[in-house]
Image (cartoon, grey):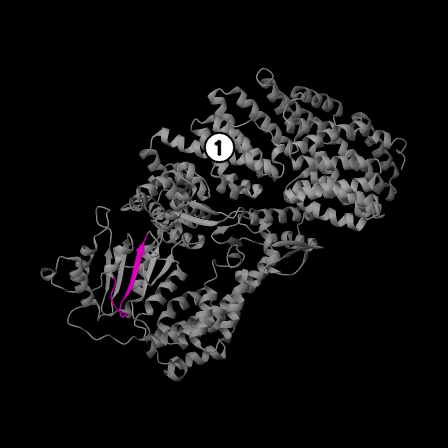
Amino acid sequence: MFEVRLLGPVEVWEGGRRAPLGGSRPLAVLAALVVHLGEVISTGRLVDFVWDEEAPATAGALVATHVSAVRRALARVGTDELIRTRPPGYVADLAPDRVDARRFEELLATGRSAERPEEAAEVLSEALGLWRGQEALEGLGQSFARIEAARLGELRLVAEEESFGLALELGRADGTIAPLLAHVAAHPLRERPRGQLMTALFRAGRVSDALRVYQEGRAVLRDELGIDPGPELRAVHQAVLTGDTGVLGTGRADRPVPAPRSAEPAPSHLPPDIADFVGRGGQIKWATELLRSVGDPGRTAPPIGVISGRSGMGKTALAVHVGHQTAEHFPDGRLFVDLRAADTTPLEPADALVRLLRAMGVDPVTLPSGIEELTGLYRTHIGHRRVLVVLDNAAGEAHVRPLLPPGPGSAVLITSRRRLVALEGAAHLDLAVPDEAEALDLFRRVAGEGRTGADPERAAEIVALCGRLPLAVRIAGARLAARPHWAPDRLAGRLRDERRRLNELSAGDLELRTSLELGYADLAPQERQALRRLALLDLPDFAAWIAAPLLGIGTEEAEEAVERLVDCHFIDVIGVDGTGLARYRIHDLAREHARERCLTEESAEERAAAVLRLVGCWLDLARKAAARGPGGTARHFPEPAAVRPLDPETEEALLARPAAWFAAEQAGLLAAVTHCADHGMARAARDLAGALIASSAALYNQFDAWSRSHTAAMAAVRRSGDVEGEAWLLAGLGQLRYEQDRFEESYVYFADALRVFEERSPEGSAVALAGMGTARREQARYAEALELLEAALERYGDNGAVGPRARVLYGIGYVHREQGRGTPAREALSRALDLYRAAADLHGEGLTLRSLALCDRAEGRYPEAERLLHDALRIFTGLQDTFGTMYTEQSLAKVELRTGRTPEARRRLVRCLEVARERQDRFGEALVLRTLGEVQLATGDTDGAREPLEHAAALWAELGLELWRARTVWDLAEVWTADGDTETARAARAEALEVFRSVGGREARERRGDESP
């Protein structure tokens, strides 16, 4: 369930995934919008909220940047619709029940209005359980956050004090003393809880303590405020002095009725409760409510609860804790049996029955030996008793069925690494890792507050490195407590190396590896092999199909293997990807253990063969997805060394939405590049890096993955001596720099690639020349660009690949158009269009239609230009190509501007600007800002044109694109003229005209004689 959490640190969660919101400014933007839920907040108000009185001059633009950062973070957990643009700013579009603070307020109101005290107490307990920290909006220091935190904090105090009052009303005074002591100490000036504490102490027979609480309160009020206690607190004090039970109550309901003593004490085999047990409030509530249903009139069978989860999750600790909390419901005893024998094999049911019967007082000499006789005797002895049976480490349903009591008087808690879904009548709890606050609380309690409080960041890092797994967190805390000379940073540093992490997580008789080994031993041989190989590549998440090539089996069989590991809690289901397939993940520590087992149980040849089978499938799917997806065929990389097709049905399902498949697999592809590069599979690393060029890494400006993959692959090919492979990767880095708008660096990379290709690969030489020419084209160095592009076309020849030739012709047509040569531009672009259509390359067709439309627009043929642009827009929309759509919309807006439809143009450009900023496309942002400035100039609003034009000019300067800056400065001259600064305007136009002439741009002819404003 999607949720924004304010009651503690500001966080966004979708299911079990937290959105990485980044720095404090994006966090403050999100918090401000959610605090004012449903209200449109202007950009100016957001600036005030985020920066208070210290906003920089660029704060307005930074707000848009931070909004985009939040949207990207939300998109990673599958939620990108929370923040919507609503002029003049933004609005958080979210149901109130998806904000924990709003739910808290609603539950508080419901609890305070409930007629039955029991119901009110339960609702208020749920409300208070939503808090995760000491304060709301922790970590934000802005005024709006402090005000909202203070408001919510006051409501929290009200809820706590209402809850204390209900507990007293329900006769639970003994249980309220400890929390009231803490509450009064934290809020000494609040009189109501002080009176409640006095009442609870009186009922517990601690009259002197109650009087001392009053005296302390009176002293604090006099010292701090110079006043005496109010009438209500004085009335409680008087009642304590006189023993007035009419005011204070008797407390009889607090005292349990003592059970009759029997000749023999009831067996109590539960292990001791854990003194520092923390958290798990919801799970404790589930288990206690289940056990308290024992003996219900409508029951004919015992309540059975199955607590399942991976090794180290705290299943046994939870069961034991609940067993102690519900002890009063089982006066005839609490039995505990570990169903795993000392040699790690499951305890036989007959042996478990013998232990249970002996615990109930049966003479071991009289016990039968057969399982059926033992089962019958067990049911006879337990049938008339009220006993809690805790069965720990159950291996399967058949393992526990003989041990279940026959009637409704007893209850059973079972812990298992498997879900035991076939166990009749059982309620199931899948135990997941605790949230960050609970895990940190456990770590502090074990390590000591003094050890962790001084460095909370390192404490949080240690907990994260332990994957919040309770056993691992406890061991880490114990290690720190045992080494007073260690700072938390030292332990964190040792845990950062995942290859030695399992060795570090050992303290005394607690060892995480032993716990993981027990779970691994439970698996069948095929399940073990599946887990080992799925862990081999360090994939952050994966779809089930990848197990097929890893294991050399069919996809249906692979999915079954993965799901069996889910049932055993070795693999988690973390969501559904854009193709509609479930995504899975192995817990970090379990993955490291499984990889260790893979390295010891399988040969290097077996491991490499499994990885290369998967790589072959990835490469085949990537090649086909690129051909179907937006822009994929425009990314050139050589054919991979080997591909491996999946079965047609699986392939079709995966590639129905190619962009979504790339997005889902990108992180896995990157992890595979790194693995192959580190393990001597240089060609596989190089081919996978090439696949990432066609992926969403390129389509959505996710440059980090592109850069990291090429860096890793480059190191691998250099170690292996693959010179041609190095050249292809240099070309890939050249393309990366081009996509990043770093055109001079792009040119240098392509030139380095050309020097290697010249002697080895004509095709590679053509690719490098085309890349160099494209970089020079963007820099408006048109003569050099044309020479390079024509050389590339010659290298490809008439029989060369259709797609690459089309791309070069497109570039040649672009240069001619920018230089005002309409006829050769149309000729080159028309040839490119024919080639793109012959190759069924819709993306290239859309780009070329847009370029031809620009030729028509430049010559004033606006209807023809608009028709072509709508054709291109239909193509890009069908491809779900965001960039292609955005650039075509910008071109359409310019046609609308020139035909007098400025409102339509403005609306279209606002959408374009949002896309450009979300995708971090600085060129696109500058282009749209310039066009917005032109719209304002067309309406006579020179003041409104100033900001977008100046921002665009600054971006062009950052990108080193003098021609585009000159075009924008030419527009700014009109603004300066309107200001009366004609000298600046004249100089700017003269400077711009010189740029037009120097690059041979069409404006050199179009603007001739226009230097004067």
Image mark count: 1
Residue shown at 45%/71% (left/top)? 163
In the displayed structure, 743 sits above or below 225; it is: above
Quadrant in which residue 990 is drawn: top right
Q: Quadrant of the C terminus?
A: top right
- Percent coordinates x, y for residue 577 in the rendering: 52, 47
Q: Which residues make up the magenta segment?
A: 404-416
In the displayed structure, 934 sits above or below 230; it is: above
- Percent coordinates x, y for residue 864 in the rendering: 80, 40
What residue is pinned by disc 1?
Answer: 673
Q: Which residue in the rendered view is the most extreme toward the left?
A: 365
- Percent coordinates x, y for residue 688 in the rendering: 51, 32
In the displayed structure, 481 sits above or below 692; it is: below
Identity of the amino acid at label 1? Val
Asked if residue 83 can be seen in this view, the reply is yes
Q: How dense is the environment of label 1, judged by Cα within 10 Å: few (below 14), some, or many (20 and up)?
A: many
As drawn, is 893 to the left or to the right of 765?
right
As drawn, is 293 to the left or to the right of 823?
left
Quick check: is 410 in the magenta stretch?
Answer: yes
Asked if residue 143 can be seen in this view, the reply is no
- Residue 223 or residue 513, whichever sits in front: 513
Determine the secondary structure under disc 1.
helix
Quick check: is 417 in the magenta stretch?
Answer: no
As drawn, is 776 to the left or to the right of 594?
right
In the displayed structure, 752 sits above or below 36; it is: above
